[in-house]
Amino acid sequence: MVMAQLVVAAVLVEGRSKSEVAREYGVSRRWVITLVQRYLAEGDAGLEPRSRRPVTSPQRTAVEVEDEIVEIRKDLDRGGHEAGAATIAFHLEQRHGTAPAVSTIWRILSARGLVTPQPHKRPKSSYLRFTAEQPNERWQLDITHWALADGTDVEILNLLDDHSRVCVGSPTPPVFKAGDVDDCFRKAAASYGDPASMRSDNAAVFTGRSRGGGREVLEVTLNARGIGFRHSRPYRPQTCGKVERFHQTLKKWLTTQPRARTLRQRQIDPSGVFTLRDNSRLHHIGVGRRHAGTDILVLVHDLHVRVLNHDGELLRELHLDPSKDYQPQPKT
């Protein structure tokens, strides 16, 4: 403010030229001209510092896009799906062929109050990220738990590709044994190919090392196939952090679904049908000949039935008609 007053006084009171005043005070001639014009138009108020913020911001995300980001976020949350900035960017690209940067989406969510600050966490810059550079370079596997409607505990084995985070298997027997883990790995590998290496914690179904005994079935299989197998250190779950994070995503989705009363495992017969008993009556449910011989998991809640394969893929969902012995596939 003081410098501006001196410059204006030198020009208007002393009658000196704008170029001379600019040289004496070490400022640009354009600034001197601007100050004089503002003073003549506004008086002393014209000499107050002005914000350099642009009147318009061509690079700012349009309000309509921000609203759509919020809408997608809420829709994903309601459906129990992953609703992070990267997921929202994917949906925008599917809709429009383009999307703002993930960091921009994150800032919009924060500004709209949809991101809960977690100050107790260390900043991301303090973490060292370990990500496989190629698909099938490394798989992570871990077992988590889920409760059926009656409180019965069941186990879920998730196998995750470290690079792409694709879930290559998610079988769900009531309790896993070492042989079950090996069988699940073989089925996943038959579909996606052998990984170069695998990583798990030190659970007894994965390794005999924690008990000082011999190798478990999975360790024998991996060794025979030349696949490396490493284990996280005790009390260091972040070493298998990707599959641990996937457990959260899966449970978030399961929370939005009808709570299953039973967990049944069976196989589709050559005609593409499996049989389900309800209230002492057998019902034959069509799934399709293309799935003949497929091992399936059947989740039943009252009359709501969901049929999944061992990879967690939904093969059919229906509302059971108790009056019919055969439940055909819906016509497309």
Image (spheres, rainbow, N blue to C red):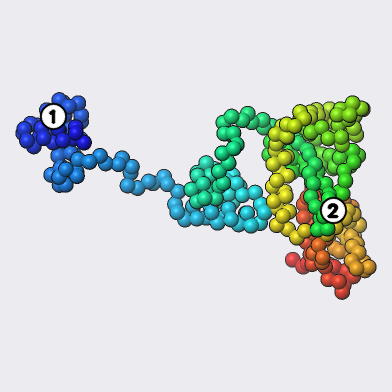
Q: Is residue 125 left or right of residue 214?
A: left
Q: Residue 255: image x %, image y %?
A: 72, 55
Quickly name the residue at label 1: 21
**Mark number, residue 152:** 2
Question: In percent of the image, x 70 and y 53: which residue is there?
Answer: 253
Which three-letter amino acid code belongs to the residue tagged 2?
Thr
Residues at marks 1 and 2, CA–CA distance in whole angstroms: 87 Å
Q: Is residue 192 visible?
A: no
Circle 1: element type: helix
* Nearer the observer, 278 or 328: 278
The quarter of the displayed image where residue 34 is located: top left
Question: In percent of the image, x 91 and y 57: which residue is there?
Answer: 269
Which three-letter amino acid code belongs to the residue tagged 1?
Val
Q: Residue 218: image x %, image y %?
A: 87, 34
Q: Earlier in the sequence, mark 1 or mark 2?
A: 1
Question: In percent of the image, x 51 and y 46: which residue is there?
Answer: 110
Circle 2: element type: loop
